[in-house]
Image: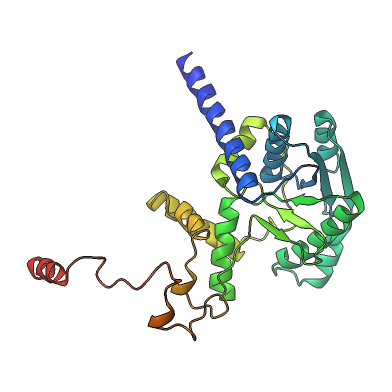
Amino acid sequence: MKDTRKLAYSQNKLVKRLQRQVGEAIVDFNMIEEGDRVMVCLSGGKDSYAMLDILQALQRRAPINFELFAVNLDQKQPGFPAEILPAYLDKLAIPYQIVEEDTYSIVTDKIPAGKTTCSLCSRLRRGILYRTANELGATKIALGHHLDDMVETLFLNMFHGARLKSMPPKLVSDDKKNVVIRPLAYCRESDLEAFSVLREFPIIPCNLCGSQENLQRKKIKQMLANWDQEQPGRVVNVFKSMSRVTGSHLMDRDLFDFVGLTADNAQHLTEFDTAFDDSPLELILTRSNAAQ
């Protein structure tokens, strides 16, 4: 009996934590406003299921009025169980649309066997979703990327693109007609996995990209998993660093005017080069000599 109560308490904390984190992300980045019509992109994976579940819960008690409707893109992958999502969404009594586009054939035709298909697949999917959002009058497009996805993307861009860039919680689409939001930005993937088990979501695997074992993202994911084991909190600190950027301490000349920087015009700076962290030189030298 005690174990049952303990489990229920833990599950309740998980639900409240995820709902709080999504609510905070929405407020921090002004993701959803009064009268918005939010298109929730539902893939059949744990993250998008969780996003829809949490957004519905928040919608019921939000101080503003907004609509939610779900959209799934059936990419005609072999063996895709097309009946699962409609059955699930019918039970929720939420408006939805299944968009059928055979991107699978395009991807397999254009990409040689054994090569990574994710990039092309993602571009095709994104274009179809943007078009659908316009057709259905959506004011926001909600995607199910979470904190771990954003950190993984940061390292992918650094390691393979030499760019300090990640997934922002909110952005404008490249056609400049849609606003994309990521309500799960503050949520850890491990919490979403536990939530998926708790809610018993009918998960649909991605057979197209899930069969590719050597993707660079998977290597980054394993690196972050190792970090979580070795030093819990490191991944979250990396995530937090993306919202605490000091332009004067990086190297982007478009972000900061290094060329025009002099000692005479540095009044606007908030951070400077600190040689000894406010400690007297004599004290530091004394400690160094004592250590020897």
From this view, report whether residue 90 is shown above or below residue 158: above
Image location of residue 200, percent across then percent down: 68, 32
Image location of residue 50, percent across then percent down: 67, 39
Quarter of the picture containing the C terminus is: bottom left
**Residue 72 in sight:** yes
Name which quarter of the figure residue 279 lies in. bottom left
Q: Is residue 111 left or right of residue 54?
A: right
From this view, report whether residue 73 is shown above or below residue 279: above
Q: Residue at x 27, y 73 (%)?
A: 275
**Residue 201 in sight:** no
Image location of residue 156, percent across then percent down: 57, 67
Q: Nearer the viewer, residue 187 or 210?
A: 187
As drawn, the residue found furthest toward the top would be 1
Q: Residue at x 64, y 37 (%)?
A: 196
Image location of residue 76, percent across then percent down: 86, 54
Q: Nearer the viewer, residue 253 or 82?
A: 253
